[in-house]
Amino acid sequence: MIFPVLVEVQLRPGIADPQGSTIERSLPALGFEGVSGVRVGKAIRFTVDAPDEGAARERAAALCQRLLANPVIENAEITIENGNRP
Amino acid sequence: MKVGVVLFPGSNCEHDVVEAVSRLGGNAEIIWHGERSLGGIDAVVLPGGFAHGDYLRPGAIARFSPVMDAVADFARQGGPVLGICNGFQVLTEAGLLPGALQKNRGLKFLCTTVAVRVESSRSVLTSGVRAGEVLRLPINHFEGNYTCSEEVLSRLRDEDRVVFRYVDNPNGSIDDIAGICSREGNVVGLMPHPERACDELLGSADGAGLLRSLQAVETALAAAPAAAPAEAPA
């Protein structure tokens, strides 16, 4: 079966995010008040051919571990999209 | 003394390294990243640039280049390995040095000359330089903000592995770190570019002492090769 996978890579809590803080600082100038906690990450989509969802998740996790995220500074969250992708 | 300079697609400082090494009386050759062996070289340099376009993260793809297995073996056998700028990023991604390099605090690409203090003379790059000496070296990076866990930081300090610190921290690096080395001192990574500071005409010749140290190391190491196990990235 083909499983669509979404991997969201985010900087770990506590790791400074200069992109996020720069965006956040620019918001009041555009008239957006009260927005805080801006963090910038990456969304990576792909499909995995696997016998079931568990196996697809396992493959995706291995891929995150080896390549997609750097565990020193990043966390990866895996979503199997079950074909419900908009 | 022969220095192998690895060329990844997107490297752009390989010729600077070759030129600097040759002018210091050494021999340097470029090694394509697709090679599986390093040939008969005495030291490896991973030069600056944007290996594989810095896609995903700097060094993330370069780490899987075929030549990197040979570089890791060479490092494990005690061979001198130097990563400059992007090369430092590759070494951390490959787990040959701990920690990671993230975007500069302030989000600016930095291209300037900075004062860098030598903190330890036990690395292959600083064996001929006194600790405490301040060098003027160019930096040229967007992701030079070194970070690591508290545990790794205290290990680096305890084991005398912080090789260089910025005198005036330009990028937000933890503990002002500009360069570190492996436990045995044979793998060194730094963000500043010693190869671009080997002639007064270029504004500074302070990098020459570092590259001279690297070139002097081989005989000592050839006599007593140390085993340097790869480090888990943490």
Image: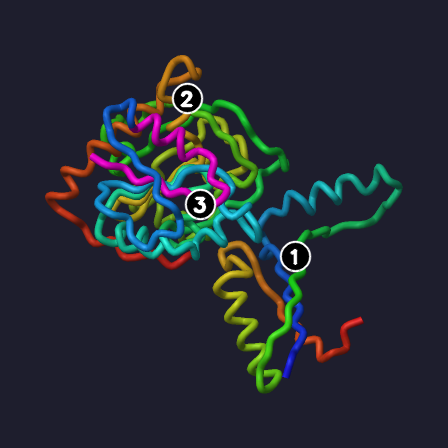
In this picture, residue B126 sits left or right of residue A86: left
Provide the chain ID for the residue under circle 1: A
Residue type at mark 1: give it: Lys
In front: label 2 or label 3: 3
Secondary structure under tag 3 reads loop
In this view of the protein, can residue B161 be seen by the observer? no
Mark 2 vs 3, N-terminal side: 3
Residue at the left extreme, as displayed? B223
Mark 3 is surrounded, within 10 Å at the Cα level, by few (under 14), some (14 to 19) or many (20 or more) other residues, namely many
Q: Could you tell me if the residues under marks 3 and 1 are in contact, i.e. CB atoms within 8 Å?
A: no
Q: Quadrant of the C terminus of chain B?
A: bottom left
Query: Looking at the image, which is closer to me, B136 or B9?
Result: B9
Q: Could you tell me if the residues under marks 2 and 3 are in contact, i.e. CB atoms within 8 Å?
A: no
Q: Height in image: B59 above or below A68?
A: above
Mark 1 vs mark 2, CA separation in Å = 36 Å
Secondary structure under tag 1 reads strand
Residue type at mark 2: give it: Arg
In this view of the protein, can residue B17 be seen by the observer? yes
Q: Height in image: B21 above or below B181?
A: above
Residue A49 in the image: x percent, y percent? 59, 79
Residue type at mark 3: give it: Phe
Whether discs 1 and 2 lie on one chain: the answer is no
**Mark seen at residue A42:** 1
Provide the chain ID for the residue under circle 3: B
Residue A57 in the image: x percent, y percent? 58, 77
Provide the chain ID for the residue under circle 2: B
**Numbered-mark total:** 3
Q: Which residue is mark 3?
A: B8
